[in-house]
Image (cartoon, rainbow, N blue to C red):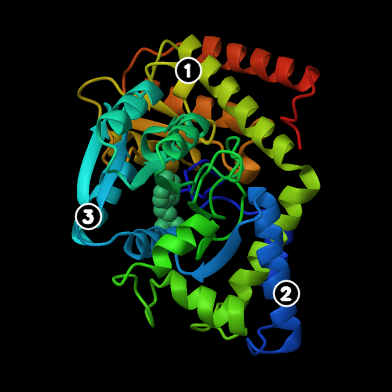
């Protein structure tokens, strides 16, 4: 196997050098005063990255532990919940909601499209009993986004709580947690922030706490418990379980990098990298997965693959021959993704992705206008740099 030169996969991603250094800090006792201070500082910095005044929980474990914990904490048996589905993670949330006994309603769009805000508004008007709306801000496997602001505001107008998977949205698209009424958000650092995997970053509004505390089924003394973090840690300074010291230092450094750059600049860099990639993909004569750029994500660009071409074969070739790691669609469809996340959402990275993908397709006998794609991508990159929109951090 050839050396890996570029990770352009959709998380975990290459982390910033400052993050790698922080991951190597000494391991201390978790109740050492310096670690306690670092943990509280990190919570505060995560809140700043989210731009929220809601409580922040740092749950040890992948983002999945936060999503599963949030769903279990919010859902009572028989609770009417509306789940919005336009991709793999939204679909998966529906299975959890059912497992926890919710009366699950679903609005589903095809995975290359987005659920329309009007459809949500109409559904909630017809079903005033819905208490919770769950949705995914950024469906990473198919690289489409939701209209998070509209969904949040509409849910509030209908008095429903919101549970939002913001794992790949944080740093990759605008999120105004408090103004848009996003009651529970779950993110990971290993996507657009360029941080380590292993920590679920969860925000919880007062309204969500009220619902969780009133839920007799909300887990306690459990790895998935949100209440434990509130009652043991936030209120009494006792950890429900030992956090990984290294990963928490990594998360703090990740936040420092993002806050120093400025969240708006982080997002602009992702937008610009995605724009460069989409321009190149089109000019190569390839088809984007998202039917409309209005909901094409900035954290990754999904490219529709020609019939009969399998993404595994293509990705393996790109990795083995050119040392570039791309992502599959994780079951969303026949597509391949060039991700723009953290350090890979900058400068020439999209051009590397375009070149590797184009040449590998040509190697497999497909007609691809590689030169035209690279030309167009580079022109888009040049315009982005000249416009000062932050594509070079
Ligand atoms: C990556 C991702 C997850 C899962 O996060 P892990 O940290 O890998 O558990 C969930 N939802 C979305 C939208 C993601 O992109």
**Quarter of the view holding residue 254:** bottom right
Q: CA distance from mark 3 to mark 2?
A: 38 Å
For disc 1, the marked residue is 293
Q: Nearer the viewer, mark 1 or mark 3?
A: 3
* Mark-to-mark CA distance, 1 and 2: 41 Å
* Above or below for 239 versus 19: below
Judge the density around disc 2: few (<14), some (14-19), many (≥20) Cα neighbours within 10 Å.
some
- Above or below, 69 against 223 in this view is above
As displayed, is residue 111 above or below residue 235?
above
| Residue 215 rendering spot, x and y as whole percentages | 34, 67
Which numbered disc, 1 or 2, marks the residue that appears first in the sequence? 2
In this rendering, does residue 363 appear at all?
no
User: Could you give the CA–CA distance between mark 1 and mark 3, rounded to whole angstroms?
Assistant: 34 Å
Secondary structure under tag 3 reads: loop
Query: Which of the two residues, 245 or 224, is positioned nearer the viewer here?
Result: 224
**Residue 179 location (% of width, % of height):** 61, 40
Pointer 3 or 2: first along the chain: 2
Is disc 1's CB within 8 Å of ligand 1?
no
Question: Secondary structure beneath disc 1?
Answer: helix
* Disc number for residue 38: 2
Rendered location of residue 176, percent (x, y) = 61, 40
Q: In the displayed structure, does residue 349 sit left or right of residue 144?
A: right
Residue that carries the numbered disc 3 in the rendered image: 102
Question: Where is residue 369 shown, x and y percent of the image?
Answer: 46, 11
């Amino acid at each position: 196997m050839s050396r890996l030169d570029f990770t352009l996969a959709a998380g975990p991603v290459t982390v910033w050098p400052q993050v790698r250094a922080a991951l190597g800090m000494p391991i201390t006792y978790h109740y050492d005063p310096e670690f306690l201070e670092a943990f509280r500082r990190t919570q505060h910095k995560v809140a700043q990255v989210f731009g929220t005044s809601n409580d922040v929980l740092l749950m040890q474990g992948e983002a999945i532990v936060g999503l599963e914990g949030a769903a279990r904490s919010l859902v009572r048996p028989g609770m009417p919940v509306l789940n919005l589905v336009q991709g793999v993670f939204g679909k998966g949330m529906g299975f959890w909601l059912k497992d926890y006994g919710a009366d699950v309603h679903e609005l589903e769009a095809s995975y290359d499209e987005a659920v329309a805000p009007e459809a949500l508004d109409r559904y909630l008007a017809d079903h005033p009993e819905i208490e919770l709306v769950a949705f995914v801000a950024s469906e990473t496997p198919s690289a489409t986004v939701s209209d998070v602001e509209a969904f949040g505001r509409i849910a509030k107008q209908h008095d429903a709580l919101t549970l939002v998977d913001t794992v790949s949205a944080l740093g990759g698209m605008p999120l105004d947690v408090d103004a848009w009424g996003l009651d529970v958000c779950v993110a990971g650092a290993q996507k657009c922030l360029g941080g380590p995997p292993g920590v679920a970053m969860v925000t919880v509004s007062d309204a969500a706490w009220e619902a969780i505390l009133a839920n007799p089924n909300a887990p306690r003394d459990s790895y998935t418990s949100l209440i434990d973090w509130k009652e043991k840690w936030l209120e009494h300074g006792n950890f429900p379980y030992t956090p990984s010291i290294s990963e928490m230092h990594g998360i703090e450094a990740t936040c420092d990098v993002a806050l120093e750059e400025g969240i708006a600049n982080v997002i602009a860099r992702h937008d610009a990298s995605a724009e460069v990639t989409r321009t190149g993909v089109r000019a190569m004569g390839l088809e984007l997965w998202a039917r409309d750029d209005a909901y094409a994500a900035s954290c990754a660009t999904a490219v529709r693959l020609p019939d009969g071409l399998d993404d595994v074969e293509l990705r393996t070739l790109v990795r083995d021959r050119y040392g570039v790691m791309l992502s599959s669609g994780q079951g969303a469809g026949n597509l391949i993704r060039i991700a723009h996340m953290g350090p890979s959402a900058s400068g020439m990275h999209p051009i590397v992705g375009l070149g590797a993908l184009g040449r590998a397709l040509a190697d497999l006998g497909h007609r691809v206008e590689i030169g035209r794609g690279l030309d167009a991508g580079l022109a888009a990159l040049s315009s982005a740099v000249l416009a000062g929109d932050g594509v070079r951090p």
